[in-house]
Image: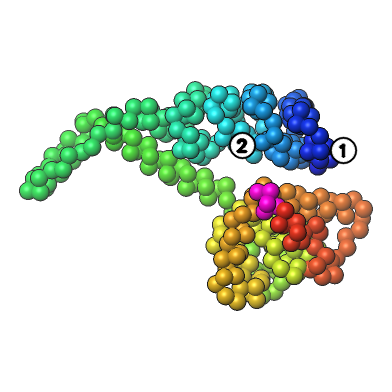
Amino acid sequence: MSASDFRQIAIRTESGKAERLFRAAVSAFCSLTRPSRREIAQLEDLTLPLFDSVPVESRRYVAAALSECEYAPAALVRRLCEEPVDVCAPLLVRSRALGDIDLIALIGRHGLPHARAIARRKDLNPTIAQLIKALEKPTLVRVRQPEPIADVAGADAEAAAAAPSAPKLPGSAAETARRRLRSMMLAEGEATSVGSATYSKLRETALTGNAAFFQTALADALDIDFSTARSLTEHSSYVSLLAALRALNLSEDRAFLIVVAVYPREFPHPQAIRIFLDRYRLLHHEAALDKVRGWKAETLSRAVRGNTPVAANGDQAPDVDKASLGASLKAS
C-alpha cells in the first residue's frame, strides 16, 4: 500500500486514526538503520498533510523521536520547528537536519525562546552563539557618540595607533556577528538554490528556440526521461513547466525568463505577467516536488515495463493539467 493510500484512509476516517498513523509512521521510520531517499520522501508525503490534524502531544512525541534520528526528513523537521519551543526543543537542541541557515531563520522568526534552546546545541557555530548572546543582553550594544568635526583627523590617527591594544566593545562584537551571519546566509542561500550551472543551461537552451535542447536540459535537471520533459513543454499552457521550475526552487525572475522564452505567446500584455507571478507564488514548493516525484515514478514504471512511449502531443502530459494545478494551489 502506498503513502497516498494511507493518506486517503486517514482523511476519510476520524482524527484519532490520523494521529495513530502519524505516530506509527514516524516510529517505523526511526527504526530504520539507514533509510533511503525514497523512504524519507514517503514519510514526508505521509506526515505533512496530516500535520495540522494531529494534536500537540503527537507533534511533541514526533519531535522527540526525530531528534535522535540521524536521517530525519528535513521538511518535516523544519515544519515541527515552527511550533512553540515546548514542542520542538529536542529538535532545536539535537537534530542534524537543521543547518546554520535554518537556525538563523528560526531565531529571526521566533526570537529568544528558540534561540535559548539552540544555544544548547553541541558544536554550535560561534557566530550564531554570538548572536544569541547579543539577543540575551541587548543593553551591551553601545552607540558611539559623534565626534567634533574639527578633531576628526586627529581622532582617526589616535584610533589607528591604539587599535592593536584597544579591547573590542560589545556593540562592535555584535555588529561583527551580524556581518558574519549575513555572509553565511548569502553563501548557504546560493548553495540551497538551484545551481547556477543548471539555471544557465536551462536559460541558454530555452533562448536558442530549439525545443529539443531545452527539453534535454530540463530532463537532466529534474532527473526524468526525455519523453516526460517533452510532454511538459509541449502542453497547451505553461502550468506543467511552472511546477517543474518551482520544484527546482528558481526565483520568480529566473522562472519567468525561462517560461517566456518557451511560451512567448502566453504573455501578450502585462496582466499575463501578473497572473504568472501570482501562480508561481501560490504554488507551494512541496506541492511542486510531489508532481516531480510522480513524473519520476512514471519514468521508473515505464523503464520497468520496458516500454517508453513518446507523448504525441502536449495534452498527454503525465498527470498534469489545469485542474490538478488548481488543486495544488488550493492545498498550498
Q: Residue at x 79, y 68 (%)?
A: 314
| Up/down of 240 relative to 143, above or below | below
Where in the figure is residue 134, as x and y percent of width and height?
Answer: 36, 31
Where in the figure is residue 135, as x and y percent of width and height?
Answer: 38, 31
Where in the figure is residue 152, as x and y percent of width and height?
Answer: 12, 46
Instruction: State whether the magenta stretch is mostly helix, strand or loop.
Output: helix
Q: Which residues are magenta?
A: 328-332
Instruction: Classify residue 315 as left or right of residue 150.
Output: right
Q: Which dot marks residue 105?
A: none
Q: Which dot marks residue 79?
A: 2
Instruction: Classify residue 134 as left or right of residue 20.
Output: left
Viewer-nearest residue: 160 or 268: 268
Viewer-nearest residue: 212 or 160: 212
Reply yes or no: does residue 123 show up in magenta.
no
| Up/down of 162 relative to 191, above or below | above
| Up/down of 137 relative to 247, above or below | above
Q: Residue furthest front?
A: 14
Viewer-nearest residue: 253 or 60: 60
N-terminal of the pair, mark 1 or mark 2, is 1
Question: Mark 2 falls on what kind of element?
Answer: helix
Q: Residue at x 67, y 28 (%)?
A: 55
Q: Are marks 1 and 2 in contact (CB under 8 Å)?
A: no
Reply yes or no: does residue 329 show up in magenta.
yes
Badge 1 amino acid: Met
Residue 94 in view here: no
Question: Mark 1 falls on what kind of element?
Answer: loop
Instruction: Quadrant for the N terminus, please.
Output: top right
- What residue is shown with label 1? 1
Q: Residue at x 53, y 38 (%)?
A: 102
Badge 2 amino acid: Arg
Give the image quarter of residue 38.
top right
